Image: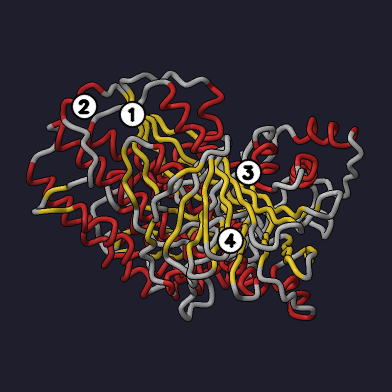
Amino acid sequence: MCGIVGYIGSNMAAPILINGLKKLEYRGYDSAGVAIFEDNDLKVIKSKGRLAILEEKVNKDMPKGLIGIGHTRWATHGEPNDLNSHPHISHSGKIAVVHNGIIENYIELKEFLQSEGYKFVSETDTEVVAHLIDYHYKGDIVEAVIESINEVEGSYALGVICKDCDDKFVAARKDSPLVVGLGKNENFIASDIPAILEYTRDVYILEDKEVVVLSSDNVKVFNNHGAEVKKEIFKVNWDVSAAEKSGYEHFMMKEMFEEPKVIRDTISPRIKDGSISLDNINITSEDLEKIEKIYIVACGTAYHAGVVGKYVIEKLARIPVEVDVASEFRYRDPLITNKNLVIIISQSGETLDTLFALREAKKKGARVLSIVNVVGSSISRESDDVLYTWAGPEIAVASTKAYNTQLSALYLVAMDFAMKKGHIEEGFYKKFIEDLKNIPQVIESVLANKEVIQRFASEHYNAKSIFFIGRGLDYALSMEGSLKLKEISYIHSEAYAGGELKHGTIALIEEGTLVICPMTQDNLMDKMISNIREVKARGATVLAITKESNQQVEKVADVVVTIPDVDSLIAPIAAVTPLQLFAYYMAIQKGCDVDKPRNLAKSVTVE
C-alpha cells in the first residue's frame, strides 16, 4: 500500500521522483522519502507527513544526482515518523531500499542479521531487506538482490540503489505491483503507471520474482535464478489528463462526473448488433449447464458490487451465487470444484487478499473470471477470463466510478448467462440492453441536481451516527453508501436490511438520528415506507433516494432525492451516485481530505 518511483537517466532525479510520487500519493501518505546517488554517495531525504513536507525539504537542498528512488508510505510496521520512513539504508551505508509489501519472516531474518553485527534503527520490516542485501553484497548488486529475495518470505516491490554503482539500479517484485518505464536515454520504475505516464507510454509489467536492472540506455530483466527473461512492451493508451484533476477541486468529484462516460465505455463495446458479446470470454451454454454454483470474491467496494451481482445473476440466470470477502475466503477452505465459476472483482487488479483467493480457487479446479480495471494487473494475468471495466485511472482513495463500472460488467455477465441458459425471452433481453445503454444519461441527470444533496449535507454534517436501510438491491446499495461515508467523513454509519430494524437496530433510533433510505425497488416500496414510518415515529430524520414516479415517498421522508425512472433491476448503477455525493459533501463540510482519507490507501497490496 505504498508508492515507489525510481529513475536513471540524463536529468536530475529528484524533481522526477517528487513528481512521480505526487501521482502515487493515493497509495500512501503518512511519510515520504527519496535517496539520490550524488558525488559517489547516497543522499537520503525523508520526512513524516504529506509529500509536500518532503518536497519542501528537497527544494531547499536539491540533490543533483541522476539516479534515485522515492517512496510514499502507508505504515504497516512502525508508526509514521522520520526513522520509519523509506528509503532505508544498510548498516554499511552502501545500500538504499524502498519497499511495498510485507516481509513475513522479517523477525527471523532480523535476529540472524543482529547476530552478524547489524544494528537496526527503525521498527520496519523493510530495514531487514536493506541489511540482508548488504550482507550478500560482494561487489555484484544484482547477485546480492537475487540471493536476498530468495530468502525473503512475503510480498515485496523493491527499488535498490548502491553507492558503488554509478550507472545502474535494481528492482524486484513478488505479489506487489511494479512496472518498468522505458524512455529515451532514461528509464523508470513505479508502483503504478500514472507516476511515469508523463515521461513514457512504453512499459514492462514485471511478474513475480523477476529482477530488473536499469541503466540510462538499457533495461534487462532476470528471474530469481539469474536467467535473463524476455519481456513484451505494453503500450499505455491512457490520456495523460485522465490522471489529473482537470479543474475539479478533488479527484473524487472528477471521478463521479466521469461515471456516465466510463459506464458507456464499459457497456458499448460489449453490445454488438443488439446482443451482448463479452470480449473473448467463451463461456458457452454447455459450460453454464455444468456450473453448479458461482462464487463472487472481492474486498470493500468491489465486494458490495458483488452483492448486487448475486441478486442479479440469481434472478436472471438462476444459478446459485455465494459472495465472499476475499480476506476470509481461502482461510475457510471453501468447497470449490471444477463445477464452480469464481468471479473475482478488483479495481486495481493487485488487491493481495483477492489475488490469493483467485489462486486458491484455481488450485481447487475452478474457472476464474475476473472483473478488473487495470490492464496487465496480476489478477488479470492469472485469470482464465477477464472483463475489463474501462474506468480509466481512479486516483481518489474512495472508489466511485470503478464501482459503477463493476456493476455494469456484472449486469452484462448476468444477462449473457441468462440468455444462454434460456431463462429470459428475446423481448426482455432487448429492452434490458436498451435500459442499460440509457444509464449514463440517468446519471448525468443526477449529477446536474447535486445541489439538493449538498444542501442536506450542509445541514447535517455534525451527525455522530448515521444509519442506511434498504431492501433487496437497495440493501446492497446501502452497504456501499455506508462504507463511502465512513471512508471519507469518519462518521460512524451502519447499513441494515430494512426488515431487520425490529430485530434490535431500532433500539438505536432516537430524536435527530439521521437515516438514509435508498428506495428503488418497486415491489418493496410499501415495505420501505413502513420502515420509514417506524424510524420517524422515534424521531429520526430521513433522506430518501427514489425514482421520480414514487411520489408517495415525499409524504413520509424529510428530504427526497430523485433519479429518473429506470427499471428496478438496474437502478443501483444510478442510485449509488447520490450516495457518493452525500458522502463527499458530508466530508467537505467537516473539512476532511476526501481524496486521501486517514489510515487508508488506494491499492491494498498487503494482507
Residue nearest the viewer, comparing 534 with 124: 124
Amino acid type of the residue that numbered disc 1 sits on in the rendered structure: Arg
Q: Choose the circle earlier in sequence order: 4 or 3.
A: 3
Q: Choose the circle earlier in sequence order: 1 or 3.
A: 3
Q: Position of residue 192 (x, y in %)?
A: 52, 58
Amino acid type of the residue that numbered disc 4 sits on in the rendered structure: Ser
> Which residue is at a point 42% across and 59% down the rendered structure image?
544
Amino acid type of the residue that numbered disc 2 sits on in the rendered structure: Asp
Q: Position of residue 372 (x, y in %)?
A: 39, 48
List the residue tagged with mark 4: 215
Amino acid type of the residue that numbered disc 3 sits on in the rendered structure: Tyr
List the residue tagged with mark 3: 156
Q: Are marks 2 and 1 in contact (CB under 8 Å)?
A: yes
Q: Are marks 1 and 3 in contact (CB under 8 Å)?
A: no
Residue nearest the viewer, comparing 105 with 427: 105
Real-space Cα separation, disc 4 to disc 1, in angstroms: 41 Å
> Which residue is at a point 19% across and 56% down the rendered structure image?
435
List the residue tagged with mark 1: 367
Real-space Cα separation, disc 2 to disc 4, in angstroms: 49 Å
Real-space Cα separation, disc 4 to disc 3, in angstroms: 22 Å
**Is 515 located above or below residue 318 in the figure?**
below
Real-space Cα separation, disc 2 to disc 1, in angstroms: 10 Å
Q: How many marks?
A: 4
> Which residue is at a point 37% across and 57% down the rendered structure image?
575
